[in-house]
Image (cartoon, helix red, strand yellow):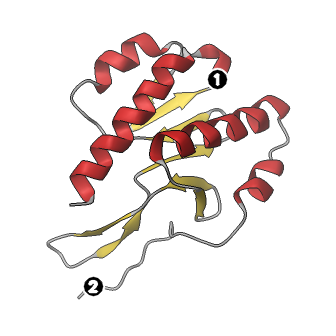
Amino acid sequence: MAKNTNKTTETVASVSDFINTITDETKRADSFKLTALMEEASGHKAKMWGPAIVGFGSYHYKYESGREGDAPLIAFSPRKSSLTLYLPGFESKEQLLQKLGKHKQSGGCTHIVKLTDVDNTVLRQLLDESFKHAETTHCK
């Protein structure tokens, strides 16, 4: 069995302490709002994953190679240039993203500069659907 070498693992660090280190006032306030939205969507309390990712819920994965570990079902990280959302793909995700507002996509990540740039109703729907998909896919 391969040893888990993931750098991003769940920690006991305080989410609010982490968010309070964000110097940009808008990004700090948006991070607290996004935490509340993701807690509502997932039904899970926010937990730190590594030094800079706020995750909600978790699942265990194991690859055919033997590598295994745990990951959050949905998560975000307040990066320097944007709030980076880690959300799984699902059937209607692209249609929701088209209605979301100002954002960028790279790989599986959704980047939002500030929450006032997006439609918060669509964001909430995106979070709800992402969590439901992740839970259905990974928590059988």
**Circle on res. 2:** 2
Q: Position of residue 44 (x, y in %)?
A: 51, 54
Q: Position of residue 95 (x, y in %)?
A: 30, 16
Residue at the image position 23 percent from the left and 88 percent from the top: 1
**Crowd class of label 2 (few under 14; some 14 to 19; many from 20; radius 10 Å):** few
Q: CA distance from mark 2 to mark 1?
A: 40 Å
Residue at the image position 56 percent from the left and 16 percent from the top: 118
- Contact? badges 2 and 1 (CB < 8 Å): no
Residue type at mark 1 is: Leu
Residue at the image position 75 percent from the left and 56 percent from the top: 18
**Circle on res. 4:** none
Closer to the camera in the image, 86 or 40:
40
**Circle on res. 115:** 1
Q: Is residue 118 left or right of residue 79?
A: left
Q: Image quadrant of residue 98? A: top left
Task: Name the image quarter holding the C terminus.
Answer: bottom left
Tag 2 secondary structure: loop
Most extreme residue toward the bottom is: 1
Residue type at mark 2 is: Ala
Q: Nearer the viewer, mark 2 or mark 1?
A: 1
Residue 29 appears in view: yes
- 124 relative to 140, above or below: above
Residue at the image position 59 percent from the left and 53 percent from the top: 54
Q: Is residue 130 left or right of residue 57?
A: left
Of pointers 2 and 1, the one earlier in the residue sequence: 2
Q: Position of residue 107 (x, y in %)?
A: 36, 37
